[in-house]
Amino acid sequence: MTTTIEGVFVDLTGALARSEVSARAFAELSDDGSENTHRAIAHHLREVTSAYALSAANMAGRSDWTLGREGLARKKGYATTEDYVQALGGGGGGTKADTRRLIEAGTMATEAEAARARQKEADLRAAEYPEAPPLDVHRPWFAPLGDAVTDGTLSTDAATAIRRGLGEPALGVTEDMLADAIVHLVAECRSLNADQAAKAARQCRDTIDAAGIASRADAMRARQYLRVFDKPDGMLHGSFELDPENGSYFKDFLLQITGPRTGGPRFVEKGEKERAQRIIDDPRSTDQIAAESLIEVIKVAAAADPGTLFGRIRPSVKLVVVQDPATAPTAAPTAAQPTAAQPTTGLVLLRNGFIEGTPDPATAATIDRTVCNTGFTPVLFGRDGTVLDVGREQRLFTQAQRAALALRDGGCMWKDCLRPPSFSEAHHLRLWQAEGGLTNLDEGILLCSPHHLRLHNDGWKIIRIGLEFWLIPPPAADPAQTPILLTSKSALKLGSPLRLQA
């Protein structure tokens, strides 16, 4: 085994001595050496975590409640398996939720292994006794997730996120359908983190179980809460959970309050620049601004007449409804918002839409209520992506164009960035002034402010080939300048690889 810190982790079969690991050793690595070492550590950590999960499942099996006093956790004086496993982890045991996910992932892997063993036994029996009736071997529908954890394809967190995101079989959703979805998700999520895997799993569930969207929305609505209590020092402390619809409005409110400080769009309407600068210059902390602004809004709302619009800050979350292509008008849409009293001839709404910036669908009831109260903005997409184009008539993208980009891109398109459309800016693929770029949809893409600045300042470039966008790193970041495919985060999944095959 080599004695360098890079060799310690790249040679994963060797023994790792703590005396060989130090901050100085890492600091002495080259840039490429640092990247390779970290990648090797991450790979090694995934393998170790897989074994850790199997061990946790073993401890859970030995502590099953059906064993009564003979259960291992109970014999050791612990009330639950989670408490026991967490205690065995010492300072690295993680939270109770982490431990629960670890046991869940290990249990999936254990059950998958047991199913493989039963199948092997059945195959051997069938070969030896071809006349005998075949053994009934049940393989859990989530077994591929367990296999992925065992062989290191997925992390334990990603596997449990997919398992929870897909849910359970239900009326119209068979185990076979969920098993097929898992095979697809394992292939697509191997390079995604747990949060992204969870979103992909929920999208898959909604794709194969459209009838269950309303019931899942009702369940989330029922889980909403807001609790407060007085602390000994006189402060009021609270916690809350909101469903996707209410949560989106609340997040958008906070983004508008604190966006100029926390990396929100820099290119804003002329009349808003002064307000944005006041927020940046405000001596209060960002958290304090958010808290006091919320109370100000509550005070104004309590004193306002019903329907009064107060202040300049109003959540601008859009409920997206999809138009039936068969009935789409030939003229390009405008940015006007027809109210319920205005005619909408030619617009046939699908029974499910989604809230801009989230992967979760909106129910038919939510769509009907929103259309009744506020109307909607119809946005049409041409097959060639040329709707709502304005060429070089103006430099900045129009509101209608931004709405279309929001639906197409779903937020910042930079790889692994999850910032929503309200936190993103429209970037010209070809610079408007220096390269004569057009303010057209096929030459625009959404990027959050930090990534937009990084692209311009550090020499990155985005090109479009067909309907795909590719990020080209500068030589300093990647001497080979290997193109990186950028995929849509939109719930419409336009061009997204996370779409289930029909």
Image (cartoon, rainbow, N blue to C red):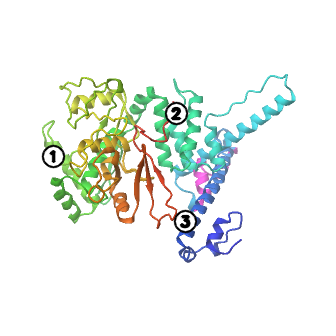
Residue 324 sits in quarter: top left
| Residue bearing mark 1 | 300
| Residue bearing mark 2 | 501
| Residue bearing mark 3 | 35
Residue 263 sits in quarter: bottom left
For the point 33% across and 36% down, the residue is 381
Q: How far apart are marks 2 and 1 (CA)?
A: 49 Å
- 85 and 22: which is toward the camera: 22
Q: Is residue 68 left or right of residue 361?
A: right
- 214 and 374: which is toward the camera: 374
Q: How far apart are marks 2 and 3 (CA)?
A: 35 Å
Residue 76 belongs to the span the image colors magenta = yes
Sequence-wise first label, 2 or 1: 1
| Range of residues picked out in magenta | 70-90
Helix, strand or loop at label 3? It is helix
Sequence-wise first label, 3 or 1: 3
Residue 127 belongs to the span the image colors magenta = no
Within 10 Å of disc 3 (Cα), the crowding (few <14, some 14-19, many 20+) is: few
Q: Position of residue 314 (x, y in %)?
A: 21, 45
Which of the numbered marks, if any, corresponds to residue 83?
Answer: none
For the point 35% across and 59% down, the residue is 450
Furthest toward the right, the residue is: 128
Helix, strand or loop at label 2? It is loop
Q: Where is residue 91 in the image (x, y as percent from the top left)?
A: 56, 62
